[in-house]
Amino acid sequence: MKPTSDNAFSDSLDEFISENATKLISANYWTLCEIKSHVDPETWEEDPDHLESVINNYELFTNKKELIDWLKERIELYEGMGYLDQFLSIGITEECDYANAESFFKALDLNYLVDVLKICWATACSNNNKE
C-alpha cells in the first residue's frame, strides 16, 4: 500500500495527534510529533522521491528496534543542539516530563505507537482521506 500523496501520512498523523493530544502520554505524543515532522514534505528540501522516503520511513518506524535507534539519534542530536527539553520534554526543568532519556524510554509504549502508525498509514493509503 502506498499513501495517496506525499503528505497524506503526515496529514493523517497530524489529525491523530490533534484529536488525541490530551489522551496521549508525553513520550508517545512527542515521538509521534517527531515522526510527523520527519515525514512531512514541508520539512524536506526539494526531494523528487519524497513518497519513497515516506514509505521507507514508515517501514523503519514500525520496526520497534529501528524506532528506538532512531529516537536515540534524535536525542543525541537535540542534546547537542541544547533543545532536548523543547523537542522531547527531556531535562531537569519544571516544564519537562522526563529527567533523562532512560525515563523517556521507560514511559514509551512501542506497541501503541506501532499500532497508531499502522492506523494512520491505512488512512493515508485510502482514497477516503481528507485532501
Image (cartoon, rainbow, N blue to C red):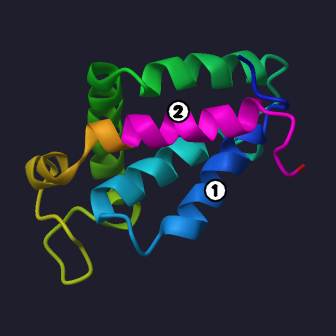
Magenta range: 113-130
For the point 30% across and 25% down, which residue is it?
Answer: 64
Disc 2: which residue? 118
Query: Residue 46, percent across and down?
Result: 82, 29
Disc 1: which residue? 14
How far separated are the C-alphas under marks 1 and 2?
A: 14 Å
For the point 67% across and 44% down, which residue is it?
Answer: 10
| Residue 114 is covered by the magenta coloring | yes
Residue type pointed to by label 2: Lys
Q: Is the magenta stretch mostly helix, strand or loop?
A: helix
Q: Is residue 42 left or right of residue 36?
A: right
Q: Which sits earlier in the primary sequence, circle 1 or circle 2?
A: 1
In the picture, residue 68 is in which quadrant?
A: top left
For the point 30% across and 36% down, which residue is it?
Answer: 111
Q: In this view, does 75 lie to the left or right of 48?
A: left
Element at label 2: helix
In the picture, residue 30 is in which quadrant?
A: bottom left
